[in-house]
Image (spheres, coloured by chain):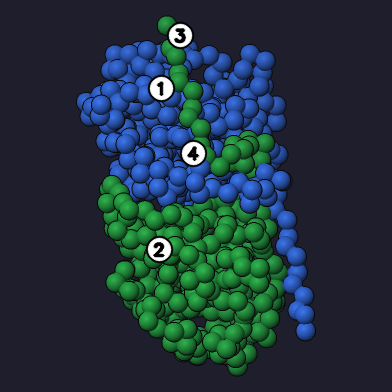
Chain colours: A green, B blue
């Protein structure tokens, strides 16, 4: 059996604060239709795909922010995505803000089977930014305020996509991609396809000392390419891009193969669909040779990775003479 | 105080089997003299820098291979390196095959202070290849035969280099660079400078199925650049390069900054010295913001990284309907 899949990354242009979910959803349905015309088996939408990236605004009382969160999927507003999935026989990945019945808040992503059933849910673990208003920043990045740390670990599940038979599917969200621990946690479960959405500001560190802004897209790609290579998997990294409520988010969504090569790249800062054919058998080479974990990994030497969150200063060398 | 250092990577061209250590050492001393003229504070030599890459040949009885190993540093053959270090006031990193007094064998690297004192020793942990003769390979890669797994962990030490004051120094060797666990183990100790040497065949997988040979240098760079970015450190990756006893090793030695950028790159397959000025204060930015480990890492979600060496297949999804 061929293990070939057509992967689609559905980059979204900006979604303004004044726009409702129905605006975003209509654009996403149009992208799903394009994906169908390109023969895609799965389409990946960005993180927090239904609204503007609201963690850039401080909110004293989070109950005033409830309108940013979804309490059910599908809802009236998101039902058209599920209908399009069924109609086009396409699975889709969606990032959204989740509020649970008991009032917990997560930055969440789901992979939805064409039937409409949720196959896998992930809640973002590496929340960037801060939880309190930071007067040194001209733009806030309050993910640690708006969301709890995800409580589902880094799950991988084996589920059918298209005609490729079962595929080992994992997810991460935005900042997770910079952390090799996230990639490895998926790699330890033989992940073959990592779906990840992001909302990444082009400028993030104003008034906070030097940062090489021109390298931010490079860092994004470097992390995804290294993660795919070192874990022998495909990655679909999808941006919300462009100037959203006056704040620029970079694009450059990519589809990456297990060699770490970029197979497709978005070049606009707007709604844009890119596709690539992935031969899942490519995951085998790394996994059975240079990255044959059982043969080459040495967990007994990795203790520091779990021993603490923070780093420790090394000992000072004292010359003998 | 300025924390600027001039780093030098001293790539070596091939060392043929017929050549003695004195040939290699003379070339290395010449490179140290060049490093001195370029104002270098530290010079990094490759893995197994004193001899040909002997793990490409099978040897039934390892006692017949004792001549490849060093039993003392300095020895008569290596003393000129230590003399040059003192004369030029340059610290140096040297990779070599180590045989201990009790007969253990390691793929080892040391960082030597200009005074000649060994500051830090590391023994390679991620040994690639295999331990028995593999008839499917046209070229053997018998590191698992010639060496034990390193028993010193991933040490980092804070020691003075040049006029930059104390620097957090760590090392890895060749294949280690592909493993994010190795980088992170150093990063957890606030490493600022990673020295690493390699001997990497341009063709490694003959008769073992498809490998994208043209990507091997890319994979090398990708791993080093990601490791430096994700751990906010400088990296000096140094090759033994060229056609050695009929077998091609790739070059492309690089010096990388904490943004993951390549600051200098060797472009020959021969002895070649490249230098770059490193401002160690650059390590602070990542460490205090996006990669502030204490604030952002989530070890409670990383359990799988230590739980086993090998990966585990994920559960199969069963549709509800």
Q: Residue at x 40, y 39 (%)?
A: B233
Q: In the shown orientation, is residue B55 left or right of residue A26?
A: right
In-front residue for pair A198/A100: A100
The correct choice, above or below, for A17 with respect to B102 in the image is below
Tag 2 and tag 3, C-beta contact below 8 Å: no
> Which residue carries the number 2 mark?
A58
Q: Residue at x 63, y 13 (%)?
A: B101
Across and down, in percent, residue A271 comes to 39, 81
Q: For marks 3 and 4, give the one nearer the viewer.
A: 4
> Which residue carries the number 1 mark?
B159
In-front residue for pair A162/B62: A162
Q: Residue at x 62, y 79 (%)?
A: A72
Marks 1 and 4, how far apart in space?
A: 16 Å
Q: For marks 2 and 3, give the one nearer the viewer.
A: 2
Across and down, in percent, residue B273 comes to 30, 34
Point out which mark residue A320 bears.
Answer: 3
Q: Quadrant of residue A201?
A: bottom left
Point out which mark residue B187 bears.
Answer: 4
Chain letter behind tag 2: A
């Amino acid at each position: 059996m061929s293990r070939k899949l057509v992967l689609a990354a559905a980059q979204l242009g900006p979604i303004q604060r004044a726009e409702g979910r129905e605006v975003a959803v209509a654009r996403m349905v149009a992208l799903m239709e394009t994906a169908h015309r390109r023969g895609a088996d799965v389409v990946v939408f960005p993180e927090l795909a239904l609204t503007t990236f609201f963690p850039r605004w401080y909110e004293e009382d989070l109950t005033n922010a409830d309108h940013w969160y979804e309490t059910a999927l599908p809802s009236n507003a998101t039902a058209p995505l599920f209908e399009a999935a069924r109609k086009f026989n396409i699975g889709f990945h969606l990032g959204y803000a989740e509020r649970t019945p008991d009032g917990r808040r997560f930055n969440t992503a789901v992979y939805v089977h064409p039937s409409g059933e949720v196959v896998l849910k992930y809640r973002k673990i590496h929340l960037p930014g801060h939880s309190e208003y930071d007067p040194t920043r001209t733009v806030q990045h309050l993910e640690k305020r708006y969301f709890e740390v995800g409580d589902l670990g880094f799950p991988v599940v084996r589920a059918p996509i298209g005609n490729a038979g079962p595929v080992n599917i994992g997810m991460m969200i935005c900042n997770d991609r910079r952390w090799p621990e996230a990639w490895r946690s998926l790699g330890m479960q033989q992940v073959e396809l990592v779906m990840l959405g992001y909302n990444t500001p082009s400028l993030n560190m104003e008034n906070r000392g030097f940062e090489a802004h021109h390298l931010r897209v490079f860092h994004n790609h470097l992390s995804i390419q290294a993660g795919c290579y070192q874990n022998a998997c495909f990655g679909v990294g999808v941006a919300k891009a462009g100037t959203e409520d006056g704040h620029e988010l970079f694009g450059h969504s990519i589809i990456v193969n297990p060699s770490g090569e970029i197979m497709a790249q978005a070049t606009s800062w707007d709604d844009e669909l890119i596709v690539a054919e992935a031969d899942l058998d490519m995951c085998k080479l790394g996994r059975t040779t240079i990255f044959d974990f059982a043969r080459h990994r040495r967990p007994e030497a990795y203790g520091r990775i779990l021993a603490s969150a923070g780093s420790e200063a090394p000992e000072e060398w004292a010359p003998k003479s």
